[in-house]
Amino acid sequence: MDYDYYFSLDYNYTYEDNWTFTEETFFKHTSTCLTDGLCMSLLVFSALVFLLGFFGNALVIWMAGFKMKRTVNTTWYLSLAISDFVFCAFLPFSMANMVMEEWVFGLAMCKIASSVLFLNMFSSIFLLVVISVDRFVSVVFPVWAQNHRSLGKASAVVVLAWLLAMVLSLPSAVFRDVGTHMGHTICFNNYTLSHFSHRAVVLSRFVAGFVVPFFVIMCCYYVIVVKLRSNRMMTKSSRPFRVMSALVAAFFFCWLPYHVFILLELQHHRYDHVILTSGLKVGAAMAAANSFLNPVLYVFMGNDFKQTFKHSVLSKMENAMADEGRTVSRYLSRSSSVDGRASTHI
């Protein structure tokens, strides 16, 4: 038996041996999360990720979808925000499982909740690749990009990226299972049907969701930097370049620990059990953190998002204050007129 935390921050196990799961309970299970330092820390961290990611991405969706002019760039970032928003919406299931150390949401939700993590991972990295290629084409072939870069094509590319992400997320739905073990119900990865399934799934996710996309991104960035420096356009194009660089760096540092420990878990018998399981938990938590970092980078580094945020929020506050001021003025004017009439009668 080995441990595989395939959905962020909760206790999900991978079984490759011939374990038998029954509904009989031979052990009385009691949760220890609230008394365990690491578990409590991850629980608090996941709560912060949920709050910041859910409302932060909702803010980005509101701005990019309803307040900003629809462009190719806003199409990319809107899709990223939707991906992160959906992931954060499923975090409460993981948090409840952490506290109870019991999966009570059934088989269907076990498969869906796990699939959402990888849907978020693949869709995010594919969209970052698309944005990088789009930047590459705009810099290297500006005339062609100006004539062929359109909202319709951008929307079609986003749909293709999401479809590919869904296909690569299917193993979670296929291998995820629910069973009773050691007195409690768990949501786990069941690789007992095929000896090579576990290794194939992990390696395919690492290659398709990390290695190949980053190779493409780095190649695009290298050509972009060389081109901009040769044309002395680095300063003019620095802000969007910095935003995109920050998004790529955040994805890399958030997901790298997760992939490292998942690969180590393939040879779990060679490593200390406590270190491996703790690393898997922390790696999954860092992967989840990527979902709330993206909206922070949009708002604080993206000039368009920053201006739209200030304009939308401040204008609403000004309107609210103006309405309140007008209401008070009308009240005072009516009070003055009543007082005037009263003084006349007296």
Image (cartoon, rainbow, N blue to C red):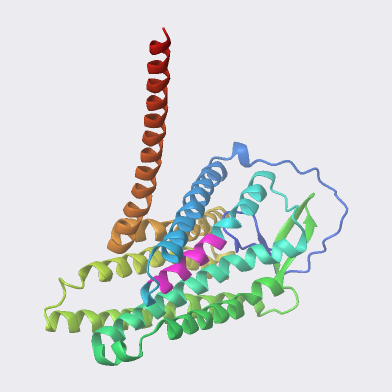
**Which residues are the magenta region?**
74-86
Q: Magenta includes 322?
A: no
The image quarter in which residue 276 lies: bottom right
In the rendered image, the quadrant that contains the N terminus is bottom right
Image point (82%, 64%), residue name: 20
Image point (52%, 43%), residue name: 44
Image point (34%, 43%), residue name: 318
Above or below, 240 against 88 in this view is below
Seen from the viewer's position, the closer of residues 248 and 98 is 248
Seen from the viewer's position, the closer of residues 131 and 145 is 145
Seen from the viewer's position, the closer of residues 147 and 17 is 147
Residue 132 in view (yes/no): yes
x, y percentage for residue 45?
A: 50, 47
In the rendered image, the quadrant that contains the C terminus is top left
x, y percentage for residue 7?
A: 60, 61
x, y percentage for residue 75?
A: 43, 73
Could you tell whether 236 is left or right of 135 in the image?
left
Seen from the viewer's position, the closer of residues 122 and 314 is 314
Q: Magenta includes 81?
A: yes
Above or below, 341 against 280 in this view is above
The residue positioned farthest toward the top in the image shown: 346
Could you tell whether 267 is left or right of 221 in the image?
right
Image point (71%, 62%), residue name: 110
State the predominant SS element of the stretch in magenta: helix
The residue positioned farthest toward the front in the image shown: 345
Number of callouts in the render?
Answer: 0
